[in-house]
Image (cartoon, rainbow, N blue to C red):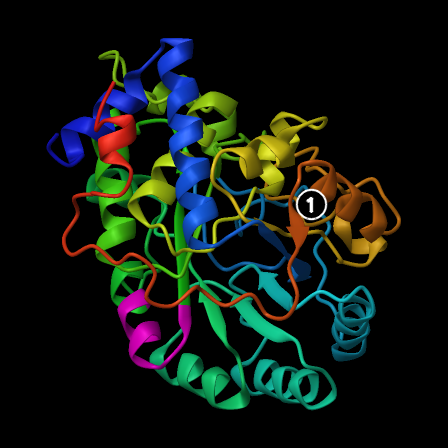
Amino acid sequence: MKPMDGDGLLGWLREEDPDKIESLWEWANTVRRRTVGDEVHLRGLIEISSFCRRRCLYCGLRADNSLIERYRMSRREILESARHAQRLQFGTVVLQGGEDPGCSADWVASVIRELKKESSLAVTLSLGERSYGELALWREAGADRYFLRFETSDAALYRRIHPSLSSIPSDRLSILRSLRGLGYEIGSGVMIGIPGQSYRSLVEDILLFRSLDLDMIGVGPFLPHPATPLGTSPRRFSRTDGEQVPATELMVTKVIALSRIFCPEANIPSTTALATLNPERGYELGLERGANVVMPNLTPHPYRSRYEIYPKKAGTGRTSFDAGEIRDRIRSMGRTVGKGPGKRSPGCLRVPGSKILMGVEQFGEQP
C-alpha cells in the first residue's frame, strides 16, 4: 500500500463513515502509544496579561475591544503561580499573554531568571510576535520553549484575519524558524473552522506541521467572540462553495489524530477550547485520539475570567485547579501522569518527507 499523502489527508477530513473514523482513532492512538507512550504531561497555564496591540479579527483580546477589563500580572503573582505548579508536581509552566508592550523584554527576562533559579520547571512562552533580540534574550534567560500559532497556511486568509502592524509585517513562519535557530523547542498550530478556511488549506496546515518539524502542536476549534468582526458577522467571511471547514468536535479531533500520525514525536495537547466545546469529555476525547498533554489553568482566579479570547472558556469558573481530579481522570483511561518537563521524544520513528509509513500496512492510507 502506498504511503498516505495530501490526498489521503483530504479523504480523512471529509470522511463521514463512523466505522472508518473509528479506525482513524485507533491508528492515532497506536502511533501515540508507540512513540510517546501512555504518559500525559501536565503544563500549568499562567495567563500573564490580557493587553494586546494586535487587531486580529477573531480574538477577544484585540486592541479595539473596549468591553473587556484588562490586567497585567505582577512578578510576584506570576512566581507564586509557578510555585503552585511546582507544588502540584507539574513539569512545565506556560506563560501566555497578549502581545503586550507593557511586558518589556527585560522584565520578562527577569521573571524567567527568577523562576528558573527557584524551581526545576521548564518554561514555555507564548507572548506573540516578538523581535529576534527579545527572543534571544529570553532564551538566554532560560526559556525552554516558545509557542506561536501560524493560524493558517493560507496566506490570503491569514492576511485577512490577522492584520500586520503598520510598521511591522507579520511573518510567523520566519519567527518560528528563528526560534528553532535560537535553540527553543518550538510549537505552533491552527484554528479549526475559522471562517474562510477550506479543507485543502487544512491539509496544507498539517503538512506544514511536519515540514516545520514542530515539537508541540496545538489545534482547537474556532470559538467566536461577540466583540470581534468574526464573531459579529461570521457569514460574511465564511466560504460559500461547500469548502468551509466546520468548527466541530469531530473535525478538531480528526486534526489531532492526523497530526499525531504525521508528527508522531510531537507533544500535542487536548486543549481548553476542546473542553469548552465538550465540558464533560473534551479532554478525554483529545487524549483518546492522539493527544498526550493537558494544560490546567493556574491563572489566579480574579484574572482568569478576564483573559477572554473567547467567551465561557472551560475552567474560568473555578477558584483553583483540582490536580487530584485530573490525575484521576487520566488514570481512569489507563494512562499515567508524566513526570518532569516532558520534552519531545527524540529520534522516534523519523520518516523523511511528508509521507507517512508507520501503521499504513495495518490501517491503510485513506478511507
> Is 166 on the left or on the right of 192, as rendered?
left
Q: Is residue 178 magenta?
A: yes
Q: In the image, residue 40 lies at what x, y percent?
A: 61, 52
> Is 160 on the left or on the right of 190, as rendered?
left
Quadrant showing the C terminus? top left
- Check disc 1 and report its element: helix, strand or loop: loop
Q: In the image, residue 341 lies at what x, y percent?
A: 59, 70
- Residue range in magenta is 176-185
Q: Quadrant of residue 112?
A: bottom right
The answer, for residue 61, to whether it is visible in the render is: yes
Quadrant showing the N terminus? top left
Label 1 crowding class (10 Å Cα cut-off): few <14, some 14-19, many 20+?
A: some
Q: Is residue 151 magenta?
A: no
Q: In the image, residue 235 lies at what x, y percent?
A: 39, 17
Is 271 or 363 nearer to us in this picture? 363
Is 281 or 173 nearer to us in this picture? 281
Provide the residue designation for mark 1: 68
Look at the picture and state if 257 lies above or below 195.
below
Look at the picture and state if 212 lies above or below 158.
below
Task: Identify the residue at the far front of this view.
Answer: 362
At 34% from the left and 22% from the top, the residue drawn is 245
The answer, for residue 227, to whether it is visible in the render is: no
Q: As shown in the figure, which amino acid type bears the numbered disc 1?
A: Ile
> Is 37 on the left or on the right of 242, as rendered?
right
At 67% from the left and 28% from the top, the residue drawn is 281
Is 50 or 175 nearer to us in this picture? 175
Name the chief secondary structure element in magenta: helix
At 31% from the left and 68% from the top, the residue drawn is 175
Look at the picture and state if 103 lies above or below 128.
below
At 81% from the left and 59% from the top, the residue drawn is 300
